[in-house]
Image (cartoon, rainbow, N blue to C red):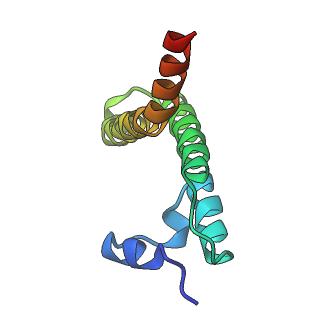
């Protein structure tokens, strides 16, 4: 059975070696499992990916020759932060409702 991410990688002209460690874990998990990815799995992945991208951004020099890499990493961090906020919004809304009821 093909990995569900193979088509996405092919469309983006990427290979397994281009993935970050967190992305590789998710890729392998998806390939070894027939179960659907849960929102909790996605939340864990995005949290790990955000942490990984942030560390890589911090370790990348702020010099002109690394300007493209820094811009790419900043964009990745922003995407992960936005996605994380989206995934956490139902949890935060539920907690806010519970607090307002008390």
In this view, the residue farthest toward the bottom is 1
Q: Is residue 3 above or below residue 67?
A: below
**Image quadrant where one finds the C terminus:** top right
Q: Is residue 26 above or below residue 83?
A: below
- Res 28 → quadrant: bottom right
Q: Residue at x 46, y 40 (%)?
A: 87
Question: Along the line of sight, which residue is nearer the eye, 91 or 2?
Answer: 91
- Res 2 → quadrant: bottom right
Can you give x and y, in whole percent of width and height, for residue 31 in the image?
62, 76
Q: Residue at x 68, y 76 (%)?
A: 32
Residue 55 left/right relative to 68: right
Question: Along the line of sight, which residue is nearer the eye, 39 or 52?
Answer: 39
Question: Along the line of sight, which residue is nearer the eye, 23 or 64?
Answer: 23
Q: Is residue 15 above or below residue 1?
A: above
Residue 68 left/right relative to 59: left
Can you give x and y, in whole percent of width and height, for residue 22 in the image?
61, 52
Can you give x and y, in whole percent of width and height, for residue 4 in the image?
49, 76
How many numbered marks are there?
A: 0
**Image quadrant where one finds the N terminus:** bottom right
Can you give x and y, in whole percent of width and height, for residue 57 in the image?
48, 33
Question: Along the line of sight, which residue is nearer the eye, 39 or 19?
Answer: 39
Q: Residue at x 60, y 61 (%)?
A: 26
């Amino acid at each position: 059975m093909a990995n569900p991410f193979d088509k996405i990688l092919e469309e983006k002209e990427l290979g397994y070696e281009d993935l970050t460690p967190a992305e590789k874990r998710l890729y392998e998990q998806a390939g070894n499992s027939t179960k659907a990815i849960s929102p909790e799995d996605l939340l864990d992945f995005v949290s790990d990916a955000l942490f990984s991208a942030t560390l890589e951004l911090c370790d990348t020099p702020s010099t002109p020759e690394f300007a493209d890499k820094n811009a790419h990493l900043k964009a990745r961090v922003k995407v992960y932060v936005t996605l994380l906020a989206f995934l956490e919004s139902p949890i935060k809304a539920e907690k806010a409702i519970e607090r307002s009821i008390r």
